Image: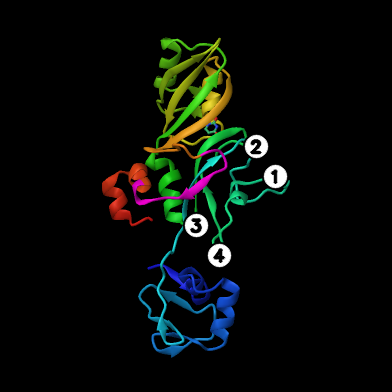
Amino acid sequence: MEEFRLQKFLAHSGIASRRAAEDIIAEGRVFVNGKRVTDPAHKVTLKDKVTLDGKTVTITRTRTYIIMNKPLSVLSSASDDRGRTCVTDLVKLDNVRLYPVGRLDYDTQGIILLTDDGDFMQRVTHPKYEMPKTYEALVKGEPKEDDLQKLRDGVELDDGMTLPAKADVIRFKGPNAVVKMVIREGRNRQVRRMLETIGFPVLKLKRAAIGGLEIGDLRPGAWRNMKHSDFEDLFGKNEARKMKFG
Ligand code: URA
């Protein structure tokens, strides 16, 4: 069962910031299972009875799950030593340290998830789950069926053969085309490299969905907390119910 430092437990319950929680604990106002605890690092689980000034403290939120439309020219990391804006800079939440779930290139826009839940992160990004990700790529030129078939069969890249992808042209734009691709891997710059390899360099790239969770009408830079239906879209109804994410 998940363990929390008492200080974090109080902060998560919404009673106080972590700093203020430390003072409240030091003042001797917090009891765990009937015993006064003054050490903010004391470990508690959801089974322990925690009281503050005699009133039971419950955790209303333990983890945070966010869906964001990453704008162009923003890094999909939690920090940058060159001072560039990161996706985590766009979300200001007290007491939560968020991490991006997987990567999107600096010059790619679209859906990215952020969380402080390592299990959720694994479930979405670990290659063994083959989570589908849908991209729309504006490419130079007009791929024909036999070009698209190469993507569907798998493409030899310098780091090996890709899994078969779904690939269709969904629009033409002058001499160029928009290719919708669904891949089940997360290699570095994979969509760009696959399309480049078959002779259609990417001019613009957007990620439209992860699993069945679409970016919808969230504008670039906007974000919201994930709802239960978002977990269903991501993992399917049955798994979402069992997993108790959200
Ligand atoms: N493939 C790419 O080429 N870039 C991304 O950001 C994601 C997938």
Q: Is mark 1 within 8 Å of ligand 1?
A: no
Question: Which residue corresponds to the image point at 50% horizontal and 79% vertical from the top-left?
Answer: 42
Label 1 – label 4 distance at C-alpha? 23 Å
Which one is earlier in the sequence, the residue at label 2 or at label 4? 2
Residue 45 vs residue 92, the one in the foreground: 92
Rendered location of residue 141, percent (x, y)? 55, 12
Q: Which mark is residue 73?
A: 2
Q: Residue at x 54, y 61 (%)?
A: 96
Viewer-proximal residue among 79 and 64: 64
Element assignment for label 2? loop
Mark 3 is on which residue type? Asp
Give the residue pinned by disc 3. Answer: 116
Q: Residue beneath label 1, please?
A: 84
In primary-sequence order, the first of circles 2 and 3 is 2
- Residue type of the residue flagged with mark 1: Arg
Q: Is the residue under label 4 in contact with that under label 2 (CB below 8 Å)? A: no
Contact flag, marks 3 and 4 (Cβ < 8 Å): no
Tell me the residue at 43%/89% (across/down). 35
Residue 57: quarter of image: bottom left
| Cα separation between marks 2 and 3 | 23 Å
Q: Position of residue 128 (x, y in %)?
A: 39, 42
Residue beneath disc 4: 95
Quadrant where the image shows the C terminus: bottom left
